[in-house]
Image: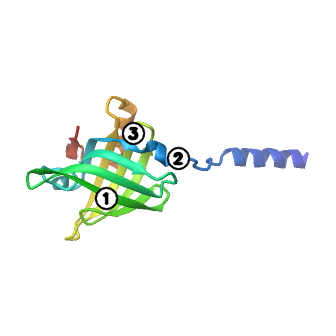
């Protein structure tokens, strides 16, 4: 009887464990668009701001160890194509050199939506929280928009600092 009870307890404990992530990140590579952005310092998302970026492609390696971002920003009124590579530092966390040091945390990831939190420390030492919503145009779900807005609240970014980017 004790063995049966122990087996039952172990079965419940094992069933409650999260499965190991076996995501093939390279499947998520391709064309992505910036849908929304929100920042604690709205100047970072303003015209000519470094994070008023219009995402074009995200390329993940198969293990998810790096992400190659290709995007457009306005610099002195001119549209420029830029790219940067972020390197994985922990589960769903990356770092890159863009507009200073930028930590990237993936908050939500699906075939059609990526919601990220960027923690940027610029060259002057100003720290800005940014939440970005990348998606596949036409495949945006209301539930994903709700997740984005929840993430902005969690980062204490005022709703009036949300910008549409598509």
Mark 3 crowd level (few <14, some 14–19, many ≥20, 10 Å Cα): many
Tag nearer the camera, 3 or 2 = 2
Q: Which residue is mark 3?
A: 113
Question: Tag on residue 84?
Answer: 1
Say above or below: 161 vs 129.
Answer: above
Mark 1 secondary-structure assignment: strand
Label 3 and label 2: CA atoms lie apart by 16 Å
| Image quarter hosting the C terminus | top left
Residue that appears at 35% across and 32% down: 140
Asked if the residues shown at circle 2 and circle 1 are in contact, with their CB atoms under 8 angstroms apart, the answer is no
Residue 110: image quadrant is top left
* First in sequence: mark 3 vs mark 2: 2
Mark 2 secondary-structure assignment: loop
Residue 34: image quadrant is top left
Whole-percent x, y for residue 21 in the image: 57, 49
Residue that appears at 32% across and 60% down: 119
Number of numbered tags placed on the structure image: 3
* First in sequence: mark 3 vs mark 1: 1
Question: Tag on residue 16?
Answer: none
Label 3 and label 1: CA atoms lie apart by 20 Å
Mark 3 secondary-structure assignment: strand
Q: Which residue is mark 2?
A: 24
| Image quarter hosting the N terminus | top right
- Is 62 left or right of 103, judged from the image as shown? right
Label 2 and label 1: CA atoms lie apart by 21 Å
């Amino acid at each position: 009887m004790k063995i049966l009870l122990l087996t039952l307890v172990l079965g419940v404990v094992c069933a409650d464990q999260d499965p190991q992530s076996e995501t093939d990140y390279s499947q998520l590579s391709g064309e992505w668009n910036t849908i929304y952005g929100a920042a604690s310092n709205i100047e970072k998302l303003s015209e000519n701001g470094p994070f008023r970026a219009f995402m074009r492609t995200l390329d993940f390696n198969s293990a998810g160890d790096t992400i190659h971002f290709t995007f457009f920003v306005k610099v002195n009124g001119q549209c420029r194509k830029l790219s940067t590579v972020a390197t994985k530092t922990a589960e769903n966390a990356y770092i890159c050199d863009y507009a200073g040091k930028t930590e990237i945390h993936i908050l939500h990831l699906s075939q059609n939506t990526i919601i990220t939190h960027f923690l940027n420390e610029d060259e002057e030492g100003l720290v800005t929280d940014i939440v970005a919503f990348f998606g596949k145009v036409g495949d945006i779900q209301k539930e994903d928009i709700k997740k984005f807005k929840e993430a902005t609240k969690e980062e204490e970014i005022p709703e009036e600092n949300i910008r549409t980017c598509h």
